[in-house]
């Protein structure tokens, strides 16, 4: 499942630089996660790096993009 940023985002810029897939971009007024690039860091790290650094805990699973770990790994592998 891809992740998403909810309205509590303060646009602090902590999440964007830690995303290994460059799935997080600055939006207006808050950051957004591209669900087609987000693999929840499967393939790159043990856990979602953006969730680790978010001071507001505003990054949550995106219910519109439910994917298994195998599907997330395949998406990561296809980006190389």
Image (tube, helix red, strand yellow):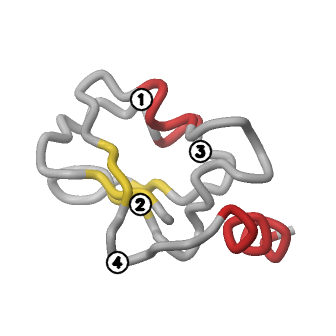
Secondary structure state at the residue bearing disc 1:
loop
Disc 2: CA contacts within 10 A as few (<14), some (14-19) or many (>=20): many
Residue 6 relative to residue 17: left or right? left
User: Within 10 angstroms of label 1, few (less than 14), some, or many (20 or more) residues?
Assistant: some
**Residue drawn at 38 percent across, 56 percent down:** 61
The mark nearer the N terminus, 2 or 3, is 3
The Cα atoms of the two marked residues, 2 and 3, are separated by 10 Å
Give the label on residue 64, or none: 4
- Report the front residue among 22 and 57: 57
Residue marked by disc 2: 33
Q: Position of residue 32 (x, y in %)?
A: 34, 59
Q: Is residue 71 left or right of residue 26?
A: right
| Residue at 59% over, 68% down | 37
Horizontal side of 58 relative to 14 (left or right) equals left
> Mark 4 or mark 3, which has the lower sequence index?
3
Q: Are marks 1 and 2 in contact (CB under 8 Å)?
A: no
SS category of the residue bearing label 4: loop
């Amino acid at each position: 499942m891809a992740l998403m940023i909810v309205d509590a985002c303060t646009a602090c810029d902590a999440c964007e630089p830690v995303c290994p897939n460059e799935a997080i971009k600055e939006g207006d007024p808050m950051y957004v996660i591209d669900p087609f690039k987000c693999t929840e860091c499967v393939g790159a790290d043990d856990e979602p790096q953006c969730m680790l650094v978010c001071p507001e805990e505003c990054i949550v699973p995106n219910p519109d993009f439910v994917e298994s770990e195998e599907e997330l790994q395949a998406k990561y592998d296809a980006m190389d």
